[in-house]
């Protein structure tokens, strides 16, 4: 070939940039679009478990075709969280047969979110469960000793989420819970009592019917024992209380929903702390409707605590105009608000 023997000038004259052929890249040349598939053929399901990127979902709930499917997250969801209790839209293989896998393409709007933070200074929230409308606060009368301030924190989280709290006292055969219950005398709080190994199953089933109820509690209080009594095939791990520290051992390591008749109960891992860094104090006051109406006469920025200047609620209580029940409810409100301080 002549260009290999000719001089450099002749080679440059014969070959220049126009002689180079660039292979087209179809991906690079494809116009970008923000349009996403509408997935009109998607089906709706309820998320009942979350395990390492796999979601257990109940499909066709309440119908003869109800079954469980396994799903993964679709890319278009981005970083949007999927938690137990979510209602989601699925595409792909939703048959639920062994080896099938569908995709979650949408998370439907949530009616409630139960959240907690790592501590009171952390505004980053951890979502525990979505779409619950009741909370079972499980507390042992003894072994481990009941912690009123932890119950206060559960109540704050429930009121903030718009969830109805219910107090379940276990192990009442070991200690009289009267003194402990006095802490909540001002609240319209339903209380259910049980002994170490016996639960009022019929009463609980009636209370849970038609509701999505999340069960929370300190480790070792008997929460998983309660779930196993309500759902015999749940087989939730049960721990014991350390005789030296008086603390329960964490046994439930995941949040899972179980069907109870027409309702659902969501068992959560036991915790020893419950951060409230994400909570809006105004939501707590709204849960005390009678006091919230009176608080409209308070000055702007009023904390409604005992040392709050010109607080209309504090003034009414000091003059005995709230009545005995009203004074108790104000005390409960102030204690709950003080947990956010």
Image: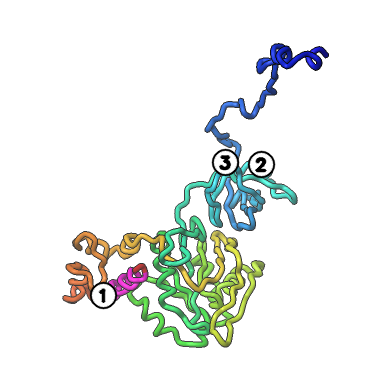
Magenta-tinted stretch: 326-339
**Label 3: how many residues lie within 10 Å, few (<14), some (14-19) or many (20+)?**
few
Give the quarter of the image for residue 120.
bottom left
Residue 118, how many percent across, how many down?
Answer: 48, 65
Disc number lying in front (3 or 1) = 3
Q: What's the mark number on residue 76?
A: 3
**Label 1: how many residues lie within 10 Å, few (<14), some (14-19) or many (20+)?**
some
In the picture, the quarter occupied by the C terminus is: bottom left
Q: State the separation of the CA atoms marked 3 and 1.
A: 52 Å
Which of the two labelled residues, at mark 3 and mark 2, occupies the earlier sequence position? 3
Give the residue displayed 39% in from the left and 85% down from the top.
179
Q: How is the image coloured?
A: rainbow
131 magenta-colored: no
Residue situated furthest front in the rendering: 7
**Label 2: how many residues lie within 10 Å, few (<14), some (14-19) or many (20+)?**
some
Left or right: residue 78 compared with residue 321: right
Which of the two labelled residues, at mark 2 and mark 1, occupies the earlier sequence position? 2
- The residue labelled by disc 2 is 92
Q: Is residue 242 above or below residue 78?
A: below
Residue 103, how many percent across, how many down?
Answer: 63, 45
Give the quarter of the image for residue 9.
top right
Left or right: residue 293 compared with residue 263: left
- The residue labelled by disc 1 is 327
């Amino acid at each position: 070939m002549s260009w290999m023997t000719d001089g450099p000038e002749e080679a440059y004259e014969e070959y220049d940039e126009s002689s180079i052929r660039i292979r087209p890249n179809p991906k690079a040349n494809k116009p970008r679009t923000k349009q996403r598939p509408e997935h009109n053929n998607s089906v709706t399901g309820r998320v009942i478990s979350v395990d390492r990127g796999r979601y257990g979902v109940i499909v066709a709930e309440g119908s003869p075709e109800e079954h469980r499917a396994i799903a993964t997250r679709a890319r278009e969801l981005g970083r949007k969280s999927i938690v137990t209790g979510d209602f989601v839209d699925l595409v792909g293989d939703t048959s639920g047969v062994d080896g099938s896998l569908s995709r979650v393409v949408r998370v439907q709007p949530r009616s409630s979110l139960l959240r907690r933070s790592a501590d009171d200074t952390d505004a980053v929230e951890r979502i525990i469960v979505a779409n619950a409308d009741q909370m079972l606060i499980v507390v042992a009368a003894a072994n481990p000793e009941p912690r009123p301030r932890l119950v206060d924190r559960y109540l704050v989280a429930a009121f903030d989420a718009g969830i109805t709290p219910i107090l379940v006292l276990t192990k009442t055969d070991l200690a009289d819970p009267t003194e402990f219950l006095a802490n909540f005398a001002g609240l319209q709080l339903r209380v259910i009592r049980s002994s170490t190994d016996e639960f009022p199953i019929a009463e609980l089933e009636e209370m849970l019917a038609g509701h999505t109820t999340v069960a929370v509690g300190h480790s070792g209080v008997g929460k998983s024992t309660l779930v196993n009594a309500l759902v015999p095939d749940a087989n939730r791990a049960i721990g014991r209380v350390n005789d030296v520290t008086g603390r329960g051992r964490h046994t439930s390591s995941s949040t899972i929903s179980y069907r109870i008749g027409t309702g659902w109960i969501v068992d959560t891992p036991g915790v020893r702390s419950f951060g409230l860094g994400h909570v809006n104090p105004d939501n707590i006051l709204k849960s005390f409707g009678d006091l919230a109406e009176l608080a409209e006469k308070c000055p702007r920025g009023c904390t409604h605590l005992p040392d709050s200047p010109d607080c209309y609620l504090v003034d009414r209580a000091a003059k005995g105009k709230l009545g005995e029940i009203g004074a108790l409810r104000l005390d409960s409100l102030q204690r709950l608000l003080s947990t956010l301080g």
